[in-house]
Amino acid sequence: MVKSMLCGICLAPGKFALIERSRPETAPEGWVLVDISAAGICGTDYHIFQGKHPFLTYPRVIGHELSGRVAETTATWEAGAQVVINPYLACGKCRACLRGKPNCCMKIEVLGVHRDGGICERIAVPAGNLYAASDLGPEAAAMVEFLAIGAHAVRRGDTGKDDRVLVAGAGPIGLGAALFARARGAEVHLLDTAQARLDQAERLGFFNLHLAIGAEFDEGFDVLFDATGNAAAIEAGFAHVAHGGSYVLISVVQDRISFADPEFHKREARLIGSRNATEEDFMAVMAAFRTGAINPELLLSERISVSDLPLRLPELANDRGQLIKAIVMLEGRA
């Protein structure tokens, strides 16, 4: 008898529903069936719902910030093991993969974007994309992925002790970058146009908070991270990169970005793209949870039952300023 499961599907921009689909009972060779415990909702999911994502076709099961339990014992995993899911499915064969950069694989497929994601009861995932998380709760495990993006950006920027850092955009991704820059000993400043986001940053122990950057920082910042998702903000950021500094672009926009080459060259600045995250970054986040360096409870804004998601998703998409992370709780059905 074929069992069914509920899936959270964006049918078209502005249209989200819970729909019954067949539950997978077998996985391809080298893949593992995982029963989803919790899923974080992030900017990507909101953009999909609002029709703003450039790389997506509808309908799509959303959700890529995922935790779960292994459904059946395999050669590498015991049934019931709690895991974090790395949603970046790489080909393993392209030049980027062969050079240890699967996060920017030429044929990458991201769960919930290029292929169906994890707001459902069960999903099949390559065994190598699962990380043991038996000592983390399901909500914390579902928050590892978004923080890993910030951890990866901090590594890309080669952020170090005593660097003066500016994170533009104090949403979840920006906060992740700020947390890991601070862990490396940097002097971290956060910039956002929304006071509510800066208030959230203050609750995480950040106090260099700015609605605008004034003349006191005319020498700029050693490392500047953009997490605004705004083309005008990205272009404005070039003026705040210190001589010899680095500009790390975490956010992605569809626009072209321009800057004054003489000024950029004069500063011997570095412009760095940061995409997704690698296993090393996932491990860094889990280590920070385990040592208490990051308290995931401070990041958790709201728990949502999957049955309530059709009502709550539009509301959350229209009012994200009060959120750090909303987590959808999923339960399998017999």
Image (cartoon, rainbow, N blue to C red):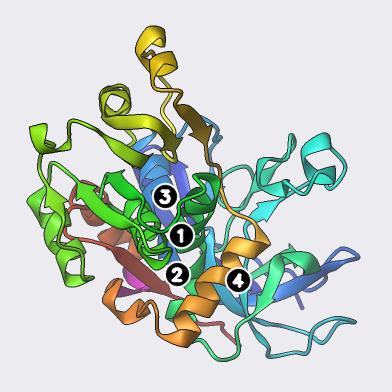
CA separation in Å, label 3 and label 2:
14 Å
Q: Is residue 137 visible?
A: no
- Looking at the image, tell me whether mark 3 or mark 2 is earlier in sequence order: 3
Q: How far apart in space, not on screen, are marks 4 and 2 (Cα)?
A: 12 Å
Q: Which residue range is magenta in the image? A: 302-308
- Residue highlighted by disc 4: 283
Residue 143: image tag:
2
Mark 1, residue position: 146
SS at badge 3:
helix
| Label at residue 45 | 3
Q: What residue type is labelled 4?
A: Met
> Cβ–Cβ below 8 Å for labels 4 and 2?
no
Q: Which amino acid does label 2 sit on?
A: Met
Please, what is the three-letter code of the amino acid marked with disc 1? Phe
Find residue 288 and report its horizontal and vertical position in percent: 47, 77
Q: How far apart are marks 4 and 1 (CA)?
A: 13 Å
In front of the other: label 4 or label 1?
Answer: 4
Label 4 or label 2, whichever lies nearer to me, is: 4
Tag 1's secondary structure?
A: helix
Task: Give the Cα distance between marks 1 and 2.
Answer: 6 Å
